[in-house]
């Protein structure tokens, strides 16, 4: 009887150790994702800044009159009208959800932080979709008409 209880206790310890190892692995991967996300966010902010700057140059600019000006205008036009979408790095979080392993994370603050981050990403996506519609209605369509009127295409 005591041997069975000892065996059960050892089994429970082994199971707890394996779960803890999984948790630590997930936490390391989450940290790596978040570190990568900082770089991703910085690059996306830089992209948005250059896009806004290019649009400002385009809207306040003039019709190109030389080959060099046409090249510059084309590059600026491309910077404005190419649309990149923000894609967050949520690999580990998605894996935790799909494998039903979120419960392995013992820290409620970490779990809540992940859920809040997911909510923030959803809000960013909604804002981005709204911004895309605004760009199409107020920037893309009028500029396409202007380009046609100027005779560039």
Image (spheres, rainbow, N blue to C red):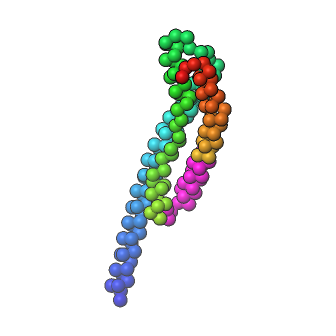
Looking at the picture, tell me which residue is in the foreground, 145 or 50: 145
Q: Main secondary structure of the magenta part?
A: helix
Q: Is residue 108 magenta?
A: yes
State how many labels appear: 0
Above or below 63: residue 50: below
Name of the residue lying farthest toward the top: 66
> Which residues are drawn in magenta?
101-124
Q: Residue at x 56, y 14 (%)?
A: 64
Looking at the picture, tell me which residue is in the foreground, 91 or 29: 91
- In the rendered image, is residue 43 in sight? yes
Name of the residue lying farthest toward the bottom: 1
**x and y, in percent, of residue 59 in the image:** 63, 22
Q: Residue at x 61, y 15 (%)?
A: 62
Q: Residue at x 44, y 47 (%)?
A: 32
Above or below 97: residue 59: above
Q: Is residue 17 left or right of residue 146?
A: left
Q: Residue at x 56, y 32 (%)?
A: 48
Position of the C terminus, as image quadrant, is top right
Above or below 145: residue 23: below
Position of the N terminus, as image quadrant, is bottom left
Q: Is residue 57 left or right of residue 74?
A: right
**x and y, in percent, of residue 22 in the image:** 40, 61
Looking at the picture, tell me which residue is in the foreground, 61 or 103: 61
Q: Is residue 106 magenta?
A: yes
**x and y, in percent, of residue 44 in the image:** 52, 36
**x and y, in percent, of residue 87 in the image:** 50, 44
- In the rendered image, is residue 50 in sight? no
Q: Is residue 131 left or right of residue 75?
A: right
């Amino acid at each position: 009887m005591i041997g069975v209880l000892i065996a059960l206790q050892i089994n429970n310890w082994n199971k707890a150790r394996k779960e803890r190892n999984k948790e630590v692995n997930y936490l390391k991967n989450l940290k790596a994702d978040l570190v990568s996300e900082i770089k991703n966010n910085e690059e996306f902010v830089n992209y948005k800044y250059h896009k806004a700057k290019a649009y400002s140059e385009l809207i306040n600019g003039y019709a190109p009159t030389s080959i060099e000006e046409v090249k510059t205008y084309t590059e600026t036009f491309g910077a404005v009208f190419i649309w990149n979408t923000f894609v967050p790095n949520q690999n580990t979080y998605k894996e935790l959800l799909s494998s039903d392993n979120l419960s392995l994370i013992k820290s409620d603050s970490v779990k809540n932080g992940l859920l809040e981050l997911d909510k923030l990403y959803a809000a960013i996506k909604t804002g981005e979709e709204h911004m895309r519609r605004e760009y199409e209605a107020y920037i893309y369509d009028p500029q396409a008409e202007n380009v046609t009127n100027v005779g560039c295409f």
